[in-house]
Every structure is written in structure tokens, then in C-alpha cells.
Image (cartoon, helix red, strand yellow):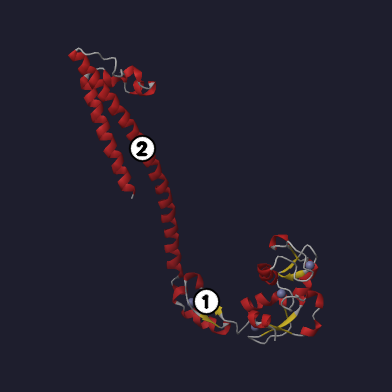
């Protein structure tokens, strides 16, 4: 029995009849996932990969400078020959199964191949044989709870989506808050300068060092022009800014 058979769960019906052209020189078994080198030598993908870990040359002809990137998959003709090799299932002892169909045999037909519960997607840990699966299935708690699980999963999915949109909304609000804070700081500077300007005017000092409101960015000046027409207006502006900012903070907190 080949090591490949033990690992894969089958044995060859007649190993001696297998065409020598489909035998891997490295593992001495029919190719699995065969790949072809630029020098036209074929190997199992995993066999040549482990070989390249040691040497970057062809295992057979020693052509150098090779890597996995230089390889191409074997052609359909080769794949057909490999798929047609007949094997025997080690679990149920079914014979004459095409090697290309063996995975399907295990998955869907083999009576003795351990299989998972149909509710394994819901984390049912049961593993057993196909002929025991029916009785497990009728008693499986996970399968019974499937409608409830699926309902919860759907709701979880909705919550995840909502959470994602709230996060992006939160980021928008943070940006808005930063803009407002910047604007607030600018306005504070303007107000301070304006106060100094008023003070200098009242005390009769030279005001040329203080910035006049007309020196600030036009958009800021236009937006807040009315604030500087009187002291009453200025106080109202300060009040507006102070009430506006904490309100934005409050929205931010609610998101979390
Ligand atoms: Zn091999
Ligand atoms: Zn070669
Ligand atoms: Zn089987
Ligand atoms: Zn189950």
C-alpha cells in the first residue's frame, strides 16, 4: 500500500498497470496536482515545492534558476489519465472508484467515512458514519434550533450594518466638530483683537498694531460681520458659539 493511499484513504486497484509517464520521480506515485517545469519535467506540486526549498533546480535534469513561478499546470490529457486510475476505498472497501471521483465518494457515498453533522455550520460537534447520521439528525439540538439561530444571525447582520453606518456618521461628526473648534478659536482671536482695538481707541493709544476686523479672511469677516457692529452683538456671538459646541459634543457621546 502506498503512503499516498494511507493519507488519501485509498489504494490502487492495480499499481503495476499505471503508466510510468504519470509517476512522480520524487514520491514515486501517480501525480497529484501535477505541474510542469520549463524543461518539460512533471512533478506533484507539493513534491517540487519541497524540493525547491532545498535547491532551485529541476529534480531530474538539474536545470537551474527555477522557482514555483516558472511552473505551469499539466495539460488535460495528463489530468484525464490520472483521474481514470482506479482505486479501492480503505474505509468501505468499495472497488474500482476513479481516483478523480474519490473525493466525491468520501463526501457523498462512503458509508464508513466519518462525516460532520448537517448542522456543523451551526457548530454541532457531531462526527460519525453516514449510516448513523440519520438518527443523529433527527435528534440534533442544533438542527432543531436552526430557525432560531438563523433569525439571530439575520438580526446580528442588521446590527452590524447599522453599527458600520453609525461609525461613519460618527467620523463625519468628529470632522465637523474639529472644523467648529477651529472656527471657534479663530473667532476667539478676532474677538480678543477687537476688544484690544476698542480698548486702545478708548484710551487713545495707537491702534496700528492691532488687527482690524477687515484684516481677517473675507469669508470669516462676511460671515460674522454683524458681530462687530456693537458690544451687545459681540456678546450674543460668544453665547451662540458657547451653546453650539457642547451640543455637538453631546451628539458625539450618544453615538457610542
Ligand atoms: Zn510526487
Ligand atoms: Zn528538467
Ligand atoms: Zn468508501
Ligand atoms: Zn448535529
Q: Are marks 2 and 1 in contact (CB under 8 Å)?
A: no
Q: Name the residue under label 1.
A: 117
Indicate left or right for 84 with 225 as reference.
right
Label 1 Cα crowd, 10 Å radius (few <14 / some 14-19 / many 20+): many
As helix, strand or loop, the secondary structure at mark 2 comes to helix
Tell which of 74 and 256 is nearer to you: 74
Residue at position x 34%, y 17% in the image: 214
Q: Position of residue 44 (x, y in %)?
A: 71, 71
Q: How many numbered dots are placed on residues in this image?
A: 2
Give x and y (percent) for residue 80: 78, 71
> Relative to 148, does residue 88 appear above or below in the rendering?
below
Labels 2, 1: front one: 2
In the image, is residue 219 above or below residue 89? above
| Disc number placed over residue 165 in the picture, else none | none
Position of the N terminus, as image quadrant, is bottom right
Residue located at (26% from left, 26% from top) = 237
Quadrant position of residue 240: top left
Q: Is residue 69 above or below residue 113?
A: above
Q: Which of 13 and 134 is in front in this view?
A: 13
Q: Which of 248 and 186 is in front in this view?
A: 186
Q: CA–CA distance between discs 2 and 1?
A: 54 Å
Task: Tell me the residue at 31%/39% (across/down).
Answer: 248
Mark 1 lies within 8 Å of ligand 4 (Cβ measured): yes
Q: Which mark is residue 178?
A: 2
- Which element carries disc 1, helix, strand or loop? loop
**How many residues crowd mark 2 within 10 Å: few (<14), some (14–19), many (20+)?**
few
Q: Quarter-wise, where is residue 187 in the image?
A: top left
In the displayed structure, would residue 221 be above or below residue 133?
above
Q: Please name whichever residue, 234 or 42, is drawn nearer the observer in this view of the structure.
A: 42
Q: Where is residue 83 in the image (x, y as percent from the top left)?
A: 75, 74
Of label 2 and label 1, which has the lower sequence position?
A: 1
* Residue 247 locus on image (x, y percent): 28, 39
Amino acid at each position: 500500500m502506498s503512503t499516498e493511499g494511507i493519507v488519501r484513504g485509498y489504494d490502487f486497484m492495480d499499481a503495476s498497470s499505471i503508466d510510468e509517464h504519470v509517476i512522480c520521480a520524487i514520491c514515486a506515485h501517480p501525480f497529484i496536482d501535477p505541474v510542469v517545469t520549463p524543461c518539460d519535467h512533471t512533478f506533484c506540486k507539493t513534491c517540487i515545492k519541497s524540493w525547491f526549498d532545498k535547491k532551485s533546480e529541476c529534480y531530474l535534469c538539474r536545470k537551474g534558476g527555477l522557482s514555483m513561478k516558472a511552473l505551469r499546470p499539466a495539460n488535460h490529457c495528463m489530468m484525464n489519465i490520472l483521474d481514470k486510475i482506479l482505486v479501492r476505498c480503505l474505509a468501505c472497501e468499495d472497488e474500482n472508484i476513479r481516483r478523480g471521483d474519490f473525493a466525491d465518494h468520501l463526501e457523498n457515498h462512503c458509508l464508513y467515512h466519518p462525516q460532520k453533522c448537517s448542522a456543523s455550520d451551526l457548530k454541532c460537534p457531531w462526527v460519525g458514519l453516514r449510516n448513523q447520521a440519520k438518527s443523529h439528525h433527527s435528534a440534533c439540538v442544533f438542527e432543531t434550533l436552526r430557525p432560531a439561530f438563523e433569525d439571530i444571525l439575520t438580526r446580528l447582520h442588521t446590527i452590524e450594518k447599522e453599527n458600520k453606518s453609525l461609525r461613519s456618521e460618527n467620523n463625519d461628526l468628529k470632522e465637523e466638530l474639529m472644523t467648529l473648534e477651529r472656527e471657534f478659536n479663530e473667532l476667539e482671536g478676532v474677538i480678543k483683537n477687537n476688544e484690544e482695538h476698542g480698548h486702545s481707541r478708548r484710551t487713545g493709544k495707537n491702534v496700528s498694531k492691532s488687527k482690524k476686523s477687515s484684516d481677517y479672511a473675507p469669508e470669516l469677516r462676511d460671515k460674522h460681520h454683524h458681530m462687530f457692529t456693537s458690544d451687545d452683538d459681540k456678546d450674543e456671538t460668544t453665547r451662540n458659539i458657547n451653546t453650539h459646541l457642547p451640543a455637538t459634543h453631546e451628539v458625539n457621546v450618544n453615538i457610542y
